[in-house]
Amino acid sequence: MHLRVRKWTCVVPTCSQRIFAERFPDVVQPYGRMTERTTHLLQTIGVITSGADAARVLAAIGLPTSAKTIIRRVLRLPLPPEGPVSAVGIDEWAWKKGNRYGTLVVDLEQQRVLTLLPERSVESATAWFQQHPDITIVSRDRGPIYRDAAQAAVPHAIHVADRFHLQKNFAEALERYFCYQVTHLRCAAAALTNQPTPSTSTLDPERVVRHHHRVAAHAEVWTLLRAGYGKEQIAR
């Protein structure tokens, strides 16, 4: 699609602009490669789904584009006004994974994003909590950053583990328990299937294999160390 626009020239010699082009703000932005209606469609589908899923949906309806283009359009959308909030979830998000992180705050009752803080720190999280003294529930991870921020700004709030970390805690506790009870579990399994009770030497062959690997690695480290290799060379 080619759009022809009118241009005007200013007759004032001191004018810094000189040439003015016709604008169509309801149709397309200056230097835009897509109409405002198409941009709105990309933003709507992108918010409902995700970048990759939205790209597949748009390609199916005849608007092929990339996931990165959709994400750029979605990031231009303004965040809704915060308003009163009583229950929030707070966690980190990555500008660049492993390098730079920010903070995401979600309204758990309205199921919407409240704000994106540009950094992950006690100071920035505390400043945001201080602006919302009515918060009564804080769902967070197990780290000290958001714990200290909430305790400093809203000490009356109840702290709860979010769903992901609650499941993680439970899974780790079960794993530790089953590791300690492996002998009883194997004996119980043998009794239920009318098999002979396994001997102590065959109760956990995986653990025996792991032990042999550790012993072999330990012996190899000492062999290289005595041969004059440094720690970094041994690690490589």
Image (cartoon, rainbow, N blue to C red):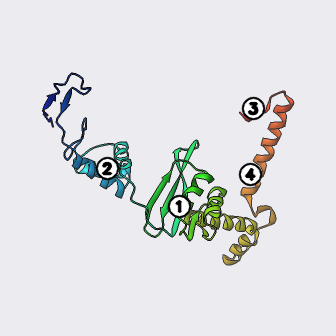
Q: Secondary structure at mark 2?
A: helix
**Three-letter amino acid code of the residue under disc 2:** Arg
Whether label 3 touches label 4, CB < 8 Å: no
- Horizontal relation, residue 129 to residue 151: left or right: left
Percent position (x, y) of residue 151?
Answer: 65, 64
Q: Secondary structure at mark 3?
A: helix
The residues tagged by marks 3 and 1 sit, at their Cα atoms, a distance apart of: 49 Å
- Asked which quadrant contains residue 99, the reply is top right
The residue that mark 2 highlights is: 56
For this rendering, which residue is in front, 26 or 53?
Answer: 26
Of badges 3 and 1, the one in the foreground is 1
The residues tagged by marks 4 and 1 sit, at their Cα atoms, a distance apart of: 53 Å
The residue that mark 3 highlights is: 232
For this rendering, which residue is in front, 97 or 184?
Answer: 97
The residue that mark 1 highlights is: 131
**Three-letter amino acid code of the residue under disc 1:** Gln
The residues tagged by marks 3 and 4 sit, at their Cα atoms, a distance apart of: 24 Å
154 shown above or below 128: below
Q: Residue at x 55, y 66 (%)?
A: 133
Q: Secondary structure at mark 1?
A: loop
The residues tagged by marks 3 and 2 sit, at their Cα atoms, a distance apart of: 47 Å
Q: Which residue of the protein is positioned furthest toward the right in this rendering?
A: 226
Percent position (x, y) of residue 159?
Answer: 61, 68
Circle nearer the N terminus (3, 2): 2
**Three-letter amino acid code of the residue under disc 4:** Arg
Circle nearer the N terminus (2, 4): 2
Q: Residue at x 75, y 56 (%)?
A: 207
The residue that mark 4 highlights is: 210
